[in-house]
Image (cartoon, grey):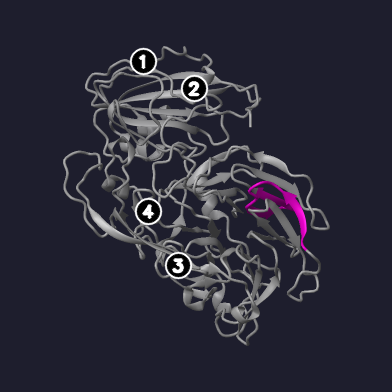
Amino acid sequence: MRTHFLLAMPAILGAIALLPHTARAQQGDGTHVGIAAAIVKPDKVEATPERMAGIKAPPGFAVSVFASGLKNIRIIAVAPDGTIYVSRRDQGDVLMMRDANGDGRPDAAPVTVASRAGAHGLAIRDGKLYLATVKEVFVADILPDGRLSPLKLIIGDLPDAGQHPNRTLAFGPDGMLYISAGSTCNVCNESNPENATLLRASPDGKQRSIFASGLRNTIGFDWQPRTGELWGMDHGIDFLGDDEQQEELNKLELGKQYGWPHVYGAGGIYPQSTPVGDISKEEWKARSTPMVLGYTAHAAPMQLLFYRGENFPAEYQGDAFVTMRGSWNRSTPSGYEIVRVRFADGQAKAIEPFVGSFLADGGKTHIARPVGLAMAKDGSLLMADDANGVLYRIAYTGNAARGAMLPPPPAGPMQQQAAQGTNVPLALARPETAQTAGGGRLAVGSSAFAGNAMLAARYSEYADGVSPPLAWTAVQGAKSYAIIMEDPDAPQKPFVHWLAWNIPASVTSLPEGLQEQPRLTEPEGVLQGRTTRGSIGYYGPRPPVGDMAHHYHFQVFALDTVLSLPFGSDRDQLLKAMQGHVLGKGELMGRYKQVQPPLK
């Protein structure tokens, strides 16, 4: 029987304006809107030939069963030789299949090649298969017969999962491993900055940063083959009604914030939540990048793939396909399909149905919930159904002219984004921090360490990760102070560990353990920026184990103005805003070395 409940709950749609208020905080702004929210879960029924005959596809396309009886298959990865790997989250393993004779069916029964609880994300590069669970990433060599060498753990500390435990992986054209880490909730302020993000890691897992944030659950992402730009499809917020929030297509760029949890879609405001640090919703909106395109709310986007193969007609080259697993939070079910994202000149223009519907009986039942999506060696598409365990094949059998195989996406855009702000002098030596005429001297000290001394472990990310106490001498005429902490010994030279500005002129010291949030309420009004790690606030030393001691420069600047610069800005934006306003500057340098490997 189909589950169907209607709920009335106070919430708000983005089109409804907020009432005026005098306080910065948004809590209790007078909003009171009732929304009818539905819980509708169509029954799962067997994927019989009669029901599968109802699957819709464009003229010339054929949908067939590649394999069945696979249970909870989720993500698909295809090796260069055509070997197919699928993860099974509920069974906690990875299956391997081959179709050497090209008949659209496996040559033999699936073989289990890996077993890990919560197995989900898969990626293949340089003869290795990478596997993500909730908190871990493993790697194994792919052997000649398609089986795997023993799994090796390369990341063991991904953030806790909560509502969205399904980590996904993909290698970018820059050779880096990208990892999706969804939010722990529907709407909340995350305590771990790596939640609700897309992460960027080195292939050995030793370096990791936050590439983009404000993403509720971007399971599907890929690079446009002609431009090399990264695109992803994000899950919308639940319980806003049948048509809110739409599923979001975003162009993902380094350092950008995409709205969640306080702003969604093209700029809708979700006022039930409250940004930390007394930041207003309008300030959060100003720092957020709106979606490029929206699709039917609650359709649940999963794996995303740009088409580069030779099987489909030429007009499909460079377009993207997205599996939509299907709604549970809508009175009329949405999703249960594959959609096509049309691109022109490298930019998304429209989203439309491609293969569907996997609903039956007028939407009361379903025969599949699409999740995994990959291109087979012959250019057909493979789609994983995690409900009935069917692996579907979508191939073009018509007469239209096929397109030629597109080359891999160019690496330039991703490399250029990663190179911004690297191989430059420390802030003190930059022309932007040249002192104005009549500037004063500024001395910096700390009650926790002397100049050139070792920092205590509690100030590092290997331990407590709290900011150390700092103090500096007042500079006459200063209207505010700013802090830039950098490590010139890191591979990203220099690595930015802390940015803070608009420290009141009356404040010449900071206590240990400041909040790691965009705006501080004590001292009032201090704003903090984006570190090289991609988080906001202090990020402590974390040199590789065994490195010589790295040097950490706590640089303090006296300014003749209060900066008009939004929270979350990066170091180069801060330096540009400071230029011509530096009355005095100084630094305190400490060192840190990690000898003991961290516990996993």
How many C-alpha atoms fall within 10 Å of the one at disc 4: few (<14), some, or many (≥20)?
A: many
Secondary structure type for disc 3: strand
Q: Is residue 434 left or right of residue 58?
A: left
Q: Please tell me whether mark 2 or mark 1 is closer to you in this view.
A: 2
Image coordinates for residue 214, horizontal then vertical, percent = 42, 48
Residue type at mark 1 is Ala
Total marks placed: 4
How many C-alpha atoms fall within 10 Å of the one at disc 3: few (<14), some, or many (≥20)?
A: some
Task: Give the residues drawn in magenta, as a range.
Answer: 110-131
In this picture, is 256 found above or below 425?
below
Secondary structure type for disc 4: loop
Mark 4 vs 2, N-terminal side: 4
The residue pinned by badge 3 equals 348
What is the CA distance from the residue labelled 2 to the residue labelled 1?
A: 21 Å
Q: Are marks 2 and 1 in contact (CB under 8 Å)?
A: no
The extreme bottom residue here reads: 399
The residue pinned by badge 2 equals 459
